[in-house]
Amino acid sequence: MKGRFQLGLMVAVLIVAGLGLTLYKHFALGFPLLGKDISTVWSIEAWVSFKARGEAAQASLTLPDQQSDVRILDESFASPGYGINQTNDGGQRRAVWSTRKADGRQDLFYKVKLRLEPGISPSVNDQPEPFIAPVLPEPYQTAATSLLNQVTDRSADPVSFAGTMISQFNAKEPDQNANMLLGMVEEGVTLPDLLVNLLHMGNIPARIVRGLHLEDGRRRQPIVDMIEVYDGTQWQLFDPKTGKAGNPEAFFLWQRGAKSLLDVMGGVNSDVKFSIISQNVPTRELALTQATQDGAALIDFSIYSLPLEVQNAFKIILLIPIGVLTVLFMRIVVGLRTSGTFMPVLIAMAFLQTQLIPGLVIFISLVSIGLWIRSFLSQQNMLLVARLGAVIIVVILIMAAMSILSWKLGITQALTVTFFPMIILAWTIERMSILWEEEGPKDVFKEGGGSLLVATMSYLLMSNPIVEQLTFNFPELMLTLLGIVLLLGQYTGYRLLELKRFYPLVHSVNSVNSVNSDK
Amino acid sequence: MGWLSSFVQNTLTKNSIATPSRLKESGILSMNSRNLNYISRYNPRRLLPLVDDKLTTKRMAEKAGVDVPKLIGVIEYQSDIRKLKSILEPLEQFVIKPAKGSGGKGILVITGRDGDRYVKASGESLSFNAISRDVSNILGGLYSLGGKSDVAVIESLIVADPIFKDYSFEGVPDIRVIVFRGFPVMAMMRLATRKSDGKANLHQGAVGVGLDIATGNSLRSVQHDLPVNTHPDTGHNFSTLKVPHWHKILCLSAACHEMTSLGYLGVDLVLDKNLGPLILELNARPGLAIQIANGQGIKPRLEMIESLRKHDLPIEERVAFSQQHFGVSIMQTPQKA
């Protein structure tokens, strides 16, 4: 009983561990459980170009930071002949490309991949920096002061203050003060700059941010200036053109603060252009990249860390336990006879390559021809091992003949015959032929049919996309399978076919009992 | 829910399928339970070669003084086949069997000579070459589990006790006794039919007749797991069948437990006209069909023996216990209609 308890515990641990790891990977790491989930990944390319003057050149570009509701998946640089450095300039990342000597037109690329993921927030310290209220030249200073007084009267907090003020400038007919200040814009000061200055004069922390509206297939997308206002706990985004608060949908912040986006030394006519495309990527790949970035040990030490080729091999290997489970179920619970214990699994794996119907046709014709030729061999006085060897060679000959014949006839399906395991086929033929001699054709059909039935069931399960996806994405489920197999190894109940086999027995036993009880 | 369960019940009955609970109620041992609870528990692996190899069994039995058919010769290597002719030459009748064969596979029974040819039990005759090919197959491992190389055993043909002449179509009827921890628990007789090619193999269509452990009287007979009343070839009614030397048969079977130390054992015996009961072979994985032949589940008997305090009783006492507790004659009476 103690052994039984231990085994029960082991089974429970295995099943729970397998399911637990699977659920963890699904919920915590975002692996899709069923089906092929698709996520949209935005890919933004910044293309820096300038004309070099035949001397040392340096270009530095502001790089985007982690920000709320967006996950940066990957970034890359392409810049032949340039050294690349990333610097941190007052909390803002910058890429610095530099070269000793450059002449003519230069093209530098930066690419970032990101995904919109509502709810994610970066844990960066983003407190406002101290500022000094600017003083504008007259008459703007007076206009600004009276405008600020107006706005203060009509607002309650920094956010409503900023909203009210921006809407002053965007009104169809701006009032006198705003109109006066708009004159500064005509003189060359940008509206966002002006607004930030005014907010600072109202003692409200504010800054200019730059970003991109994410739209698929956009080239030469301009970078858009926006204003962020600090409400005491967090930054609020304002569109200076509309006065609307809040982050517009699909807006990606590229830069915070009013520093220049691009600086070029040793070149003229510098320019930066953005192009945006969206791609649909299977969620699994995405989850993998993310998990690798997050350094999840489960992913680091897993099949995914292997080269792609090996991974593909495992894709098939990981399906074998499903076939094995099918065989166990059919033998232990149903009670079906198969020729060779796990031969059906190997046949099912061949079916994976050939597809079901061609596979069945090829298998049945191979074995039939093999049996026919084997019947000639059995008339010869031969040692068993030699005969088996002969059968293997015959099987190969049949395979070659089938391939050539079908190729000539244009039936390419039959070419997949090479996927059948020859040795297994030879053994099957040998066993079937002995069975035929000893028990007659009926048993051959019974056993052969049983094997093919189990192989077909294994195939149907193994080729099911959901099963394939579960076994490959969640190899942990193998632990659960192992637990189930251990459990099946303890099954002492009746096999389904025994229910039929013993029917006449129960029937008569019960009639005897009923006679007894009638007495 | 009521109509659903009655619908299920009807469908099962219509297709003659029993419910698991009903089988359990009748104490029927399942294949899985046999493998897990009895064979793997009471038959240690290291002892299995003793019974898997019939030559070892035979030598062991001879040493223990248990009666077995006479060993005439052994062919161990392919090169020994040359000696086959000289061994077979003086023999009228003989049996060649693979030492590691299972399920009666590869057993060749020669009942007479027809000039140069050898006549099988079925009347078919074989040339010497055909026989040596069979022997070569045996040595090559055609009939052994896993295709391991094997040896061919030649032994004397048993002269069947004429008592069973009417019950068997050619061949020698054999008696299977299940011995659990030294106690005979269930027995049946296997009778060859035309369909089974003179072999006493239930799988091939032989008739199984359940035997009362107390008396050796027939209880019930089945062919292909289905009840029959008369022999399909001879037409004889089985209800009158009674096995002689019953007590000796039980004692011989029980003795095989000491001989092999196996806990769950199928003992196959034959009744020789001159020598009486002989042990033919032992089986460490006896089949379940014996339950159908007996019309009884074997599980209650096995459990009764498992619940005994003391198992190492002398053979006589064990046999007496079995005859006392597992006899069916008492409750047999109302069945005949």
Image (cartoon, coloured by chain):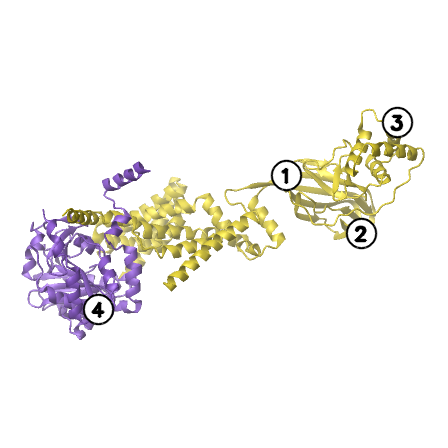
In front of the other: A139 or A90: A139
| Chain that bears disc 4 | B
Q: Is residue B83 visible in this depiction of the protein?
A: no
Q: Tell me, what hue is chain B? A: purple
In three-dimensional space, the C-alpha distance between marks 2 and 4, rounded to whole angstroms, equals 97 Å
In three-dimensional space, the C-alpha distance between marks 3 and 4, rounded to whole angstroms, equals 117 Å
Instruction: Name the kind of residue labelled 2 in the image.
Output: Lys
Across and down, in percent, residue B106 comes to 20, 60
Marks 2 and 1, the one that precedes in the sequence:
2
Question: Answer yes or no: do the residues labelled 2 and 3 have beta carbons within 8 Å?
Answer: no
In three-dimensional space, the C-alpha distance between marks 2 and 1, rounded to whole angstroms, equals 36 Å
In three-dimensional space, the C-alpha distance between marks 3 and 1, rounded to whole angstroms, equals 45 Å
Q: Tell me, what hue is chain A? A: yellow
The residue under label 3 is: A176
In front of the other: A357 or A171: A171
The residue under label 2 is: A101
The residue under label 4 is: B257
Same chain? Circles 2 and 4 = no
How many C-alpha atoms fall within 10 Å of the one at disc 4: few (<14), some, or many (≥20)? many
Extreme-right residue of the structure: A138
The residue under label 1 is: A278
Judged from the image, the secondary structure of the residue bearing numbered disc 3 is helix
Instruction: Name the kind of residue labelled 1 in the image.
Output: Ser
Judged left or right of residue B102, residue B72 is left
Instruction: Name the kind of residue labelled 3 in the image.
Output: Gln
